[in-house]
Image: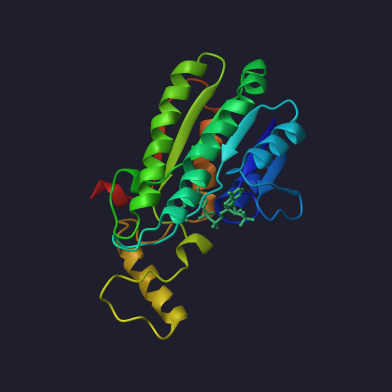
C-alpha cells in the first residue's frame, strides 16, 4: 500500500509512518520543515498541497496528522491565529483530500483524518482549535458519503497524547505567569493525566494502531473512532 502521511516528522504522524513501514507499506511523509523521508510542504498553502499531489503519484491512502494548536483565552484570540489553525486543521486537509480523491478513487483507497475529542468535549483555551476539529469531523462524514463506495473516509478522535503539541505552557487568564516552564508543563500533564480513567496519557502508538485499523476496515466509513483512555466516557 502506498500512503501519504502528513505531520510525519514527529508525534502521532511519525508513529503512523513507522507502523506502516514496519508492516511493509510504502510511506510518503510530509511536514512543513521536512526531514529524513519527509517532504517539506505546508498543507495550509496551495503550493504545499500541489507539491504533495505532484510527488505522491498513485496512492492507496491518505493519513492527515498535520495539526496546529494555539492555546488562547477568550479575549486573546487573534485573526492570524485563527487563519493558521483553520488552514492547517480544516481547510488544508479538506482540499488535500479533494485533490487526492481521483487517485484514491482509482485505487479504491482510504482517508483517515486525525481529529480530537476537543471537537465535542470543551476545554478552556482551545476555542479555535476545537472548532477546526469539529469542522474536520463534519467534512469527514460528507466526503465519506460522496466518495463511497470507492473511497472510505474516517477520523480518529484522540484524547490527550503525550507529544510536543501538549508540552506547551497553557496560561489561564488571571493566573500567575509560571516562572519555571518545565515544572508548569509537568503539573499540566499531571492534571491532564487525571482526566483519563485509564490513568495515563495516550502515546502516539496508541493512536497509530487506531489509524491502521481504519485504513484496513473494509466496511467502515464516515466513522469517528474515539481513542481517549476513557476521557469522554465521564
Ligand atoms: N497530542 C494530542 O494530545 C492530540 C490530541 C488530539 C488530536 N491531536 C492531533 O493529532 C495530530 C498530530 O498531533 P501531534 O500531537 O503529533 O502534534 P506534533 O507533535 O506537534 O506534530 C505535528 C506535526 O504536524 C506537522 N505540521 C504542522 N503544521 C503543518 C502544516 N501546516 N503542514 C504540514 N505539516 C504540518 C509538524 O511538522 P512541522 O513542524 O515540520 O510542520 C509535525 O510533524 C494533529 O492533527 C493534532 O491536532 C493531538
In this orientation, does residue 57 appear? yes
Kindly give the residue lying farthest to the left in the view shown.
234
Q: Nearer the viewer, residue 141 or 18?
A: 141
Kindly give the residue lying farthest to the front in the view shown.
79
The image quadrant of residue 57 is: top right
Percent position (x, y) of residue 112? 53, 34
Question: What residue appears at the point 69 percent right and 27 percent down from the top-left corner?
Answer: 59
The image quadrant of residue 102 is: top right
Vertical comparison of 178 with 62: above or below: below
Question: What residue appears at the point 65 percent right and 45 percent down from the top-left corner?
Answer: 17
Please say which color scheme the image uses. rainbow
Question: What residue appears at the point 70 percent right and 32 percent down from the top-left corner?
Answer: 53
Percent position (x, y) of residue 23? 69, 39
Total count of labels: 0
Q: Nearer the viewer, residue 222 or 209?
A: 222
Vertical comparison of 221 with 55: above or below: above
Vertical comparison of 35 with 176: above or below: above
Image quadrant containing the N terminus: top right
Percent position (x, y) of residue 47? 68, 40
Q: Nearer the viewer, residue 80 or 113?
A: 80
Amino acid at each position: 500500500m502506498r500512503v501519504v502521511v502528513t505531520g510525519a516528522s514527529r508525534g502521532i504522524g511519525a508513529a503512523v509512518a513507522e507502523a506502516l513501514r514496519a508492516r511493509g507499506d510504502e510511506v510518503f511523509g510530509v511536514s512543513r520543515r521536512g526531514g529524513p523521508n519527509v517532504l517539506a510542504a505546508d498543507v495550509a498553502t496551495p503550493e504545499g498541497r500541489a507539491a504533495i499531489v505532484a510527488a505522491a503519484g498513485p496512492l492507496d491512502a491518505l493519513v492527515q496528522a498535520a495539526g496546529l494548536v494555539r492555546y488562547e483565552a477568550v479575549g486573546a484570540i487573534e485573526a492570524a491565529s485563527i487563519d493558521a489553525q483553520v488552514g492547517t486543521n480544516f481547510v488544508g486537509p479538506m482540499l488535500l483530500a479533494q485533490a487526492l480523491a481521483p487517485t484514491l478513487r482509482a485505487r479504491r483507497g482510504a482517508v483517515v483524518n486525525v481529529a480530537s475529542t476537543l471537537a465535542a468535549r470543551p476545554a478552556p483555551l482551545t476555542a479555535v482549535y476545537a472548532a477546526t476539529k469539529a469542522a474536520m469531523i463534519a467534512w469527514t462524514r460528507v466526503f465519506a458519503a460522496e466518495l463511497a463506495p470507492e473511497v472510505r473516509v474516517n477520523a480518529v478522535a484522540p484524547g490527550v497524547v503525550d507529544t510536543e503539541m501538549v508540552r506547551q505552557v497553557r496560561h489561564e487568564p488571571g493566573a500567575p505567569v509560571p516562572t519555571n516552564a518545565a515544572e508548569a508543563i509537568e503539573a499540566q500533564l499531571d492534571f491532564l493525566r487525571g482526566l483519563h480513567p485509564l490513568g495515563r496519557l495516550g502515546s502516539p502508538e496508541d493512536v497509530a494502531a487506531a489509524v491502521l485499523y481504519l485504513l484496513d476496515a473494509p466496511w467502515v466509513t464516515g466513522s469517528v473512532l474515539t481513542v481517549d483512555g476513557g476521557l469522554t466516557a465521564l
